[in-house]
Amino acid sequence: MSSRGQPVFNVYPVGNYSFGTKAPKLEKDSNVNERLSRLKANYEKEGMRRSAEAILLVQEHNHPHVLLFQLGQSFFRLPGGRLRPGEDEVEGLRRKLSNRLAPTNAALQVVWDVGEVLSVFYRPNFDTMFYPYVPPHITRPKECRKLFVVQLPERCVFAVPKNMKLVAVPVFELYDNIPRYGPIISSLPAVLSRLRLNLQFVLPPPPPQQQQQQQQHNGYGQQQQQEQHFPP
């Protein structure tokens, strides 16, 4: 279902989700220079780096929030990462999400419903600059990074590596906040505007007296109560 070209996207309360921890996922590089050196070495062997990242949305206080990894005090990034040579983008993103966020318990595995690409950014050179286009003088960009919107289930369990934090950042804080979040993450409010976000709410159970009246007169008070709130 859509509204005049706006796809409808359900966003559930952050309280619907459980957050645990698992073994740390250590970074391959200790600083930016090492990361760029590895990028250059891989480019010479494999060509342009392909990356896929996920936009995961929850809602709190009637406002959409984006789930971001936080490393240290000031570094934020979207879940996802580099794809293997020849790997399908959607399958590669699912692999990355499971590796970083899925519990080790197979019974709690998350089904990642990967949707459409909302934006594409290019790294023209071996530096930290990204653009939502390929500059005209660049014939061989060094990286292509695609941002996919991912529909979270109504409830699930996340397992976050112990050396990272998973934080829910309100969309209004991201907007035009390049100094803190960088050009890609700070662009999310604009790209999300093409979706019609359907914020889901948790209704409190009725007062005991009202609940008793419902049971007496309607005969379905217990069922209605179960539909109105989630178990802890």
Image (cartoon, grey):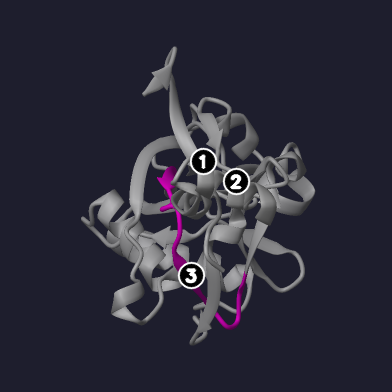
| Of the image marks 2 and 3, the number of the one nearer the N terminus | 3
Can you tell which of label 2 and label 3 is closer to the viewer? 2
The quadrant of the image that shows the N terminus is: top left
83 with respect to 15 (left or right): left
| Of the image marks 1 and 3, the number of the one nearer the N terminus | 3
Q: Amino acid at mark 3?
A: Phe
Q: Nearer the viewer, residue 200 or 167?
A: 200
Q: Residue 156: where, in percent of width, then height?
A: 44, 64
- Furthest toward the front, the residue is 216
Q: Residues within 10 Å of mark 1 (few under 14, many from 20)?
A: few
Q: Which residue is mark 1?
A: 217
The answer to whether the residue labelled 2 contacts the one labelled 1, judged by CB atoms less than 8 Å apart, is: yes
What secondary structure predominates along the stretch shown in magenta? strand
Helix, strand or loop under label 1 = helix
Q: Is residue 197 magenta?
A: no
Q: Which residue shows up at 53% across the image and 69% down it?
A: 18
163 with respect to 98 (left or right): right
Q: Residue 12: where, in percent of width, then height?
A: 53, 48
Which residues are drawn in magenta? 145-165
93 with respect to 177 (left or right): left
Q: Is residue 158 magenta?
A: yes
Q: Which residue is mark 3?
A: 158
Q: Residue 45: where, in percent of width, then height?
A: 30, 64
